[in-house]
Image (tube, grey):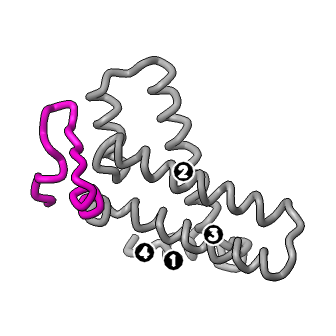
Amino acid sequence: MSSIAEAFNKAGIKPTDFPEVEIDTHKIECDMQIEFLEKWLKLLERNAPAKERYNFITQHGFLSEKHFGLYSKCIDDVAELQYRLEDCDFTGEDSNRLERKLKEAETMANNIKDILYYRIIMRQLGQKDISPYGVDLLKVKLS
């Protein structure tokens, strides 16, 4: 068989036999984040060694636990602002101010997740980020 279409045709299956499914990428991303956080909490519950936590965090796109912690704080701020905006009654001006703060917090969270941005900010603040292997992560060249 040279293609899936030919295989379906020989099996008597028509493309119209399948219902069209709309893929919700936002839901998929949320599910992946939930799965990541559940695994992270399991690592913390069993007091996983620092190297194991570090390896887990780096596999998921963060430079270190410190980087993940800063990102988590930003996401908490976003969630708090979303809650306040959805569940509280505000006048038009207060609502607009909260919406602006929410957009700023979302932008900050997206920026902080970027490793290069995180490194720049930490260098400007004069902070250090040392891995459990003793490597200064802010000075290592990124590949």
Q: CA distance from mark 4 to mark 3?
A: 48 Å
The residue labelled by disc 1 is 5
For the residue labelled by badge 1, is the local secondary structure a helix, a strand or a loop?
A: helix
The region drawn magenta spans 119-143
Q: Dot 3 surroundings within 10 Å: few (below 14), some, or many (20 or more)?
A: many
Which residue was labeled with disc 2? 33
Sequence-first tag of 4 and 3: 4
Q: Position of residue 55 (x, y in %)?
A: 29, 37
Q: Which quadrant does the N terminus fall into?
A: bottom left
Q: Dividing the picture into quarters, in which one does residue 54 lie?
A: top left
Using a 10 Å C-alpha cutoff, classify the residue at mark 4 as few (fewer than 14 neighbours), some (14 to 19) or many (20 or more).
few
Tell whether label 3 touches label 2 (CB within 8 Å): no
Q: Nearer the viewer, mark 2 or mark 4?
A: 2
Does the magenta run of residues contain 42? no
Above or below, comparing residue 94 to residue 82 in the picture: below
Label the magenta part by its dominant secondary structure.
loop
Q: Residue 102 shows which numbered tag?
A: 3
- Labels 3, 1: front one: 3
Look at 63% across and 69% down and name the residue there: 102
**First along the sequence among labels 3 and 1:** 1
Distance from disc 2 to disc 3, alpha carbons, whole Å, reads 20 Å
Q: Which residue is mark 4?
A: 3
Tell me the quarter of the image containing the C terminus: bottom left
Image depth: mark 2 or mark 3 in front? 3
Identity, as a three-letter code, of the amino acid under mark 3:
Leu
Work out whether mark 2 precedes mark 3 in sequence or the reverse, and give the earlier one: 2
Q: CA distance from mark 2 to mark 4?
A: 35 Å
Closer-to-camera residue (71/62) = 71
